[in-house]
Amino acid sequence: MRTEMKSAANVSNLIDVQAVSPKCMGLFKKGFKARNGNIDLEALGDPHYNNFLKFVKCQSKSTKEVPCKLDEKAYDICHTSIMGVGSYKGKKSCADEIKTLVACAMTGSKK
């Protein structure tokens, strides 16, 4: 029997509200704050996940950090693989990649 673990993770500890780019604040409120920080990081395609992803990508683009661009590319490769063949490096989600992207986007936005 296959057991899948749902990871409705509270990612609040990764988000510093003071560091959210003003141009991303609307996406932050829609994709993150409205869910009290609880985002299922394994639910690719879920509307809440997609809204959170839009916020993360906006925040990533608001920084000039090259590593964030690399993390975003790594996430995109993972996402494409999972949507195409159902797995990426033996995993069924991009939870690790999106956490890395969030961490970079939030770190890179601090002055």
Image (cartoon, grey):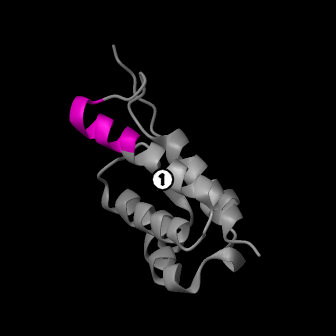
Residue at (44%, 49%) from the top-left corner?
A: 73
Work out which residue is located at the far bottom of the displayed protein and give it: 22
In the displayed image of the protein, which residue is found farthest to the left?
A: 84
Residue drawn at x 42%, y 42% as measured from the top left: 42
Q: Secondary structure at mark 1?
A: helix
Instruction: Identify residue type, mark 1.
Output: Glu
Q: Main secondary structure of the magenta part?
A: helix
- Taking 45 as reference, is 4 left or right? right
Give the position of the C terminus as an image quadrant: bottom right
Q: Residue at x 46, y 83 (%)?
A: 26
As drawn, the residue found furthest toward the top would be 1
Is residue 10 in view from this perspective?
A: no
**In the picture shown, does residue 34 fall above or below 39?**
below
What is the residue that sits farthest to the right in this orientation? Answer: 111
Q: Position of residue 70 (x, y in %)?
A: 53, 49
Q: Residue 99: x percent and y percent? A: 57, 48
Residue at the disc numbered 1: 72
Residues in magenta?
77-86
Residue 1 lies in the magenta-colored region = no
Q: Is residue 49 visible?
A: yes
Q: Is residue 45 rendered to the left or right of residue 24?
A: left
* On-image quarter of the N terminus: top left
